[in-house]
Image (tube, grey):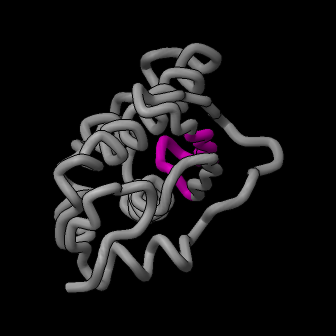
Amino acid sequence: MNQAIGNSNNMQQCSTKLIIESMFPKNMEQMKSPSGLATVTGPCGDTVEFFIKIEGKRIVRACFQTSGCGVTRACGSVATQLAEGKGLWEAFNMEPGMIISALDGVPDDHEHCATLCITALRCALIDYVKIYGWGQLDG
């Protein structure tokens, strides 16, 4: 375990996976012509913008951008990796704990970062179904 990253004032311990995903986040970019997108600001003030590309009722590409801390970057990175390849309903039912588990944990005072990223993913899915209909979640 290594020392904390981000804005954690008490320097709680962070896993190696969390540090790597924070320093080298995957899919942290803006997507041109997304099928769905959402911007969500959490209670901590971090903002996550989530982009999804959907083909055949599956997420074929997911990207994000954030103004947030290192833990939010890591959670966004993992959220995109977990979402890609999933059906829409399966992705909508993802939980923050899936991100936390994939990162081998996050500091207790940053668990809300995973919730923020899942909320942004769900809002991007809702953006998509508002255009193409709720029947898109079937299958």
Query: Residue 61 falls in which quadrant of the image?
Result: bottom right
Up the image or down, 59 lies above or below 26; here it is: above
Q: How many marks?
A: 0
Q: Is residue 24 magenta?
A: no
Of 92 and 114, the residue lying toward us: 114
Q: Residue furthest front?
A: 10
Residue 78 shows in the view: yes
Pinpoint residue 55: horizontal percent, then vertical percent.
Answer: 59, 48
Q: Is residue 27 left or right of residue 96?
A: right
Specify the segment rendered in magenta: 48-60
Up the image or down, 130 lies above or below 65; here it is: above
Q: Is residue 115 left or right of residue 7?
A: left
Residue 125 shows in the view: no
Q: Is residue 59 magenta?
A: yes
Up the image or down, 60 lies above or below 123; here it is: below
Q: Which residue is painted at 25% across and 73% down in the image?
A: 14
Q: Residue furthest right?
A: 32
Q: Which residue is painted at 30% across and 85% down in the image?
A: 16
Q: Which secondary structure is most common in the magenta stretch?
A: strand
Name the image quarter holding the C terminus: top left
Of 135 and 111, the residue lying toward us: 111
Q: Which residue is painted at 24% across and 68% down in the image?
A: 102
Pinpoint residue 32: horizontal percent, then vertical percent.
Answer: 82, 48
Q: Which residue is painted at 17% across and 51% down in the image?
A: 108
Of 137 and 126, the residue lying toward us: 126
